[in-house]
Image (spheres, rainbow, N blue to C red):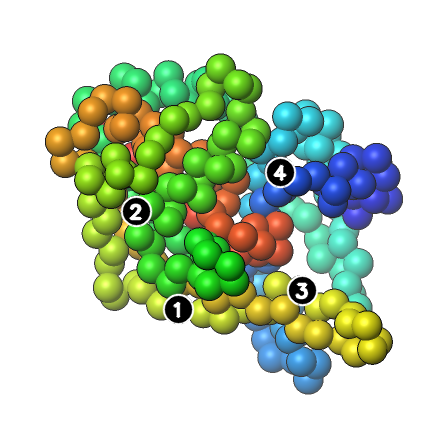
Amino acid sequence: MLEAVDADVSGHIHDSSLGSLHSSGLRGVFGDSDRAYHKSLLPDEAYHLTLGVVDPADIEIFQALVNALVLEGDRIDLSHGKLHVEQFESANTTQGELLDEVGSMDDPTIEMSFETATCIEEAGEITTMFPHRWAVFSSLLGKWNRSAPEELELDLGREAVEANVIEKPDARTYDTHSVLVNRVENDDGETRNLFRQGFTADCTYEFKDASESVENAVTALGLFAEYSGVGSAVARGCGQVSTEVKD
């Protein structure tokens, strides 16, 4: 859809090394399908899609998304029918504004809900299957520093995070997943399915004896997660997060 309204923006998103577009994928109640790796949308159900843009070209990308989804047509063609866009809401901020927001907090607690499979690759193709504090915030740190102006880049080390941040996952919500994120053709012309392993969970992050700079950086990254997603394959539905910070 983006390519149809702005080929340059579409090409930029696909070629960018930033991983600049985050998509939650459609979320809602689905029906079964007789096609492998497919689901059916139900005509009496509403579906939600969250998109996040953290690219320096975010204004152009956002405008192209609005044109594709709202202004130049509010229906998405499916294999059997159309998906009607009923409502569109937007919110924007900057990394500087996030840092200003967390700078006014005295004792923040970060509550993060990892709503879709969160696949964090720490070494090679091995993924972290638990919302460990360093895995989560180092992933966000990389996304932040790749997209932020140089003067707003964060210097946050592993030792500081592991020594001063405590993760408290809710065991009742914790689950692991293996999800299909792409299908590619190999040299023999055969289609190969690419899977990523990840987790979903509600997790609270608290601070212990942390400096103000560590608290501010980690809390800002937690808020940033809603825009960037966490981990890999965020453009294909992985790493969708909602964050609430309590002071």
Return the disc, 4 or 1, that comes first in the chain's sequence.
Answer: 4
Q: Label 3 belongs to which residue? A: 182
Among the two numbered marks 3 and 2 on one chain, the one whose residue lies closer to the N terminus: 2
Give the labeled residue for mark 2: 133
Per the image, label 4 sits on a secondary structure element best described as loop
Earlier sequence position, callout 4 versus callout 3: 4
Q: Amino acid at mark 1?
A: Thr
Tag 1–tag 2 contact (CB < 8 Å): no
- Left or right: 188, with 48 as reference point: right
Q: CA distance from mark 1 to mark 2?
A: 17 Å
Crowding at dot 2, Cα within 10 Å, few <14 / some 14-19 / many 20+, comes out as many
Residue 154 position within the rendered picture, expressed as x and y whole percent measured from the top left: 41, 25
* Image position, residue 158 (x, y; %): 31, 40
Q: Toward which corner of the image does residue 166 lie, by quadrant?
A: top left
Among numbered discs 1 and 2, the one appearing first in the sequence:
2
Q: Position of residue 60 (x, y in %)?
A: 73, 27
Sequence order check: which comes first, mark 3 or mark 1?
A: 1
Q: Residue at x 31, y 64 (%)?
A: 174
Specify the amino acid type for callout 4.
Leu
